[in-house]
Image (cartoon, rainbow, N blue to C red):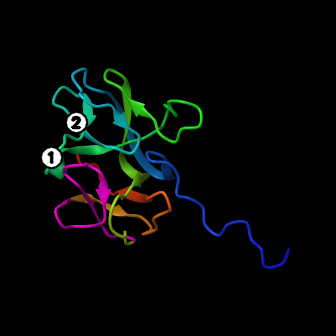
Amino acid sequence: MPGKAIGIALDLGYPGSFSRNGDFVASTRPVAQNATEQIEFGDLVALNPDNTVSKLPTGETNANKILGVAVREVKQFSAVGQAVGHYRKGEPCDVLERGTVAVLCTAGTPVAGGKVYFNPGTRVITAESAGNVEIPFMSFTTGKKDANGIVEVTIKTRNI
């Protein structure tokens, strides 16, 4: 049928999915036994002094506490048909420390190469600076945001 096409743009993926595999560094560390929250794919992850990891604490305002983003490198969905997954306390957690990953962006319009922020209350990525904390070692990769709020961010250098 002339003039018809099957889609013009694909979704950008699921939170925690690698989006460009050319340059990435990932590490695996156990989730802290005293963790109060599970780490979802795509969450910002903090490194603890005992070499364990936790979800970035609520209210954190220091981007230097961020080790990277939880990725689905080995572990996959927690149930058939779900686009989400998580790591529980004691489980090994894969963390992207350098490279490009799909994450949820809850506010603002990302710009290719633009600054990335996180909201200290929700700990979710945003493109808005007001009331949020800049992550200086990350940038938006393409500036595109799909219908599900998924964007690509590039972790340009290892933070910790």
Q: Residue at x 37, y 72 (%)?
A: 111
User: Which percent across, then down, holds residue 45?
Assistant: 28, 40
Disc marking residue 59: 1
Disc marking residue 47: 2
Vertically, is 58 above or below 8? Answer: above
- Foreground mark, 1 or 2? 1
Q: Residue at x 30, y 51 (%)?
A: 124
In the drawing, does residue 19 fall left or right of residue 107? right
Quick one: SS at disc 2? strand
Quarter of the image for residue 117 reads bottom left
User: Which percent across, then down, holds residue 128?
Assistant: 26, 67
Q: Looking at this rendering, what residue extends furthest in the right direction?
A: 1
Disc marking residue 112: none
Quarter of the image for residue 68 reads top left
Quarter of the image for residue 69 reads top left
Of the numbered discs 1 and 2, the one sitting upstream in the chain is 2
Quick one: SS at disc 1? loop
Magenta region, main secondary structure: loop
In the drawing, does residue 135 fall left or right of residue 25? left
User: Which percent across, then down, holds residue 17?
Assistant: 48, 46
Tell me the amino acid under the disc marked 1.
Gly
Vertically, is 23 above or below 27? Answer: below
The quarter of the picture where the C terminus appears is: top left
